[in-house]
Image (tube, coloured by chain):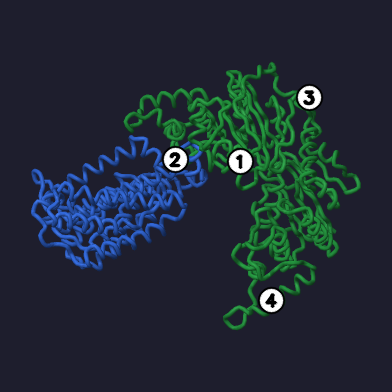
Amino acid sequence: MIAQTEKSPNKIFNKSVLSSYGTIIAGILIIIIFSVLSPSSFATVDNFINITRQISLLVVIAVGATLVMSVNEFDLSIGAIASLGGVVSAKLATEGVPIVLCILIPVLVGFLVGFINGSIITHFNVLSFVTTLAMGTVIGGFTFWFTGGSTIFENIPDGFKWIGQTGIAGIPMLSIIMLVLVLVFWFLMTQMSVGRRFYAIGGNEKASKVSGIPIKKYKTFAFALCGMLAALTGALLASRLGSAHPTGGDGYFLNAYAAVFLGMTVVRSGIPNIFGTLFGAAVLGILANGLTILEIPTFLQNVITGMIIIIALIIQKLGRENT
Amino acid sequence: MALLQIDKISKVFGTNKALNNITLSINAGEVHALVGENGAGKSTLIKILTGVYFPSEGSLHWQSNPVKIGSPKEAHDLGINVIHQDRQLISYFTGLENLYLNTKYPKSGLGINWSVMHKEAAALIEKWGMNIPLKKTVSEMTPSERTMLEIARAMMSNSKLLILDEPTASLTDKESELLFQFIERLRKEGVAIIYISHRLEEVIQLSDRITVLMGGKQIITLPKEEVTQERLIHYMTDGQASMGKNNRAKPAIGKTLLSVNNLRTSDHVVKQVSLELHEGEILGVYGLAGAGRTETMEAIYGLRKIEEGTIAFYQQLVTNPSPAHAIEKGVVLIPENRHEDALIMGNSIAENMTLPILSKLTKGGVVQRKEEDKLIDREMNRFQVKAVNKYQTVGELSGGNQQKVVFAKALLSEPSIYICDEPTQAVDIMTRKEIHQFLRDQVSENKGVIYVSSDLHEILEISDRIIVFSEGRTVANLPNENIKPDDVLEVCYRFQKEVVHE
């Protein structure tokens, strides 16, 4: 290693810069490219505010995924939980339940589902990957039964749509909710003992156990919080659309993990972190927004987005191996 | 003519010489035993012969030709095979399938020709007079059948040198006897065997020559005729008398801190362990590999399930053992495996140090940074941890400094009972001294220390009393007064024999 550094200090330096800031540089490059190609529609204040609203739901669900990944587990049921949250929320709204409860009840349901996920995984010591995949299927089936397979959109009061469709002083409510949640969970992960313990478990479960941390309790808590945020995402989505489809939240699942992984490339040590996840979601959001403005067809958008994620991962890996 | 000539082989890891100038010849049809305490260099030598490590110095000759063994595959191709304690078998494959793991399957067209496979395998075990149920999966086989299966697999490729690493560790007496007969047969066929075992009687019974290793050095190679058990033990301990140990006043032994009574773990690795630790005492725990020392410490700390027996801290029975409970009661474990059990390598020094006491440093869920920093700075200073700052990642520190972080972390939980499992393993001499001094200071403040080590000299140097473990049992309780290493080792081997022949 040392010999290598002496031989080609410049090369090593570049690689370490790439690994630390590669994703950030790429993000800035993307913004510059879109701004040059489409200055009149992309590079406007309105569009940037628009982007914060577009990424808000992705950020909320991805923050949950970040928590579960910080304890070194996966939750593949978040898409299904979001769908469930959406239909429960919309159903309650059509029944004339107060708006606060229309959000709160699905959030509690999501917390409960996550709690069950975590309890099964920690109690029986089974793989989270498979357990949550199966749980996602169970929830999907339940959601389908609950709605009879059709979209809930009739008799939804306007008050329910208020959260998803209005704003304060030109800033969308969804963007404000996103920002508040990011700050709350950033605080939880970095300033509170809960976050320290999550990261300790993710870093070395055995050593954490020796240090007296009740592993099962904390892992289950991470899953419960993740389920809660997934269901909230679904409820907010229903409010935004004024309707809820039984598979409406499913699409968020892959993008949520893409955002977390991109976010992990932002910090040197490559651990899941809240600001990184926000950044990762922003890169995905800006790409989607800019490519749409440039009228790039959807299939090509998918190709470009996927390739950018792969490249970001490779660059970070290369940089880390050489430092 | 020697089959394998090992010439002045050395192996260096960092600053540590794991092997120092080893010269051996292994002849065809010879059983050559390697004996020595843990860390003597036996495993390193085996890894060099099987292409896992490359020697730092020295050369190897195979049938008089110089060779470089660059990978386990190259060793296998030469005809060198090793049979490890932890078996290299796939447990849900049948015996037959496992037999062919390293070899090409006989084919008919695209498919596997099972009937040829059966015939070849049957001929092989017939030729060697082995009794292996080839149709059973490995998980259904007895330990001895598994050992035989591994040997059979090695013989599939006409092995010329077979290395057996503690082959009798999990065998009963009868099974061992069968294995010995088989080894005799291999020997007659001209196969060379390197035999590693902690069981000295079987080593003496089987071997043509015995080489004693200690601290990576070759102490002596003795032919069969000159070997006695006393002589071997003498060489294994370098013939040193007790180091006179602790140059300190006899401690005032106080109240009982910890008592363990007839402990037996659910996995039966610990079979019957009883011990007591008092205030102001360093209790040395010694035993050969597999004696159940680490497992006992884990059980006391709440990391291993208990089937029978009791544990009491300060005369109070522990009803529901867990690490959290132990820490709360002032018990702390310094685990044997620093990387896996003691530290979170990717986290900072600071985060590691306060992990067990986070609750105390938390108000309303928020970690009180100022208080935390004060404690961390104090311990960084006390232990003289060499690091850029307290936010440096623990994985970047040297072994000695990592261990200082482990001790600082332990001290922060304000324990009165220290359970140290190989605390000076892979640390430099200075840190080792500091650790010894630290523990002595702690016992002078009426704390108690359990000190587990595979290094007998170290045990004799630091302990007030020594508990000897053998095969999952406590077999002796010796006050450390005028004891020689030979005495302790003899107890180990004597009880091992008795247990084996039960």
Residue B483 horizontal/vertical position (percent): 78, 27
Say the numbered circle drawn on residue B118: 4
Residue at 60% across / 37% down in the picture? B297
Please tell me how crowded label 4 is: few (under 14), some (14-19), or many (20+) other residues with Cα within 10 Å.
some
User: Looking at the image, which is closer to me, B343 or B253?
Assistant: B253
Please tell me how crowded label 3 is: few (under 14), some (14-19), or many (20+) other residues with Cα within 10 Å.
few
Q: Are marks 4 and 2 in contact (CB under 8 Å)?
A: no
Please tell me how crowded label 1 is: few (under 14), some (14-19), or many (20+) other residues with Cα within 10 Å.
few
Find the distance from the CA under tag 1 to the CA under tag 3: 36 Å
Same chain for the residues under marks 3 and 4 in the image = yes
- The residue where tag 2 is placed is A214
Q: Can residue B427 be seen here?
A: no
Query: Amino acid type of disc 4?
Result: His
User: Looking at the image, which is closer to me, A317 or A136?
Assistant: A136
Which color is chain A depicted in?
blue
- The residue where tag 1 is placed is B14
Look at discs 1 and 3 and give the one toward the viewer. 3
Q: Secondary structure at mark 1?
A: loop
Find the distance from the CA under tag 3 to the CA under tag 4: 62 Å
Find the distance from the CA under tag 1 to the CA under tag 2: 37 Å
Q: Are marks 1 and 2 in contact (CB under 8 Å)?
A: no
Q: Earlier in the sequence, mark 1 or mark 3?
A: 1
Residue B178 horizontal/vertical position (percent): 80, 59
Q: Secondary structure at mark 2?
A: loop
Which color is chain B depicted in?
green
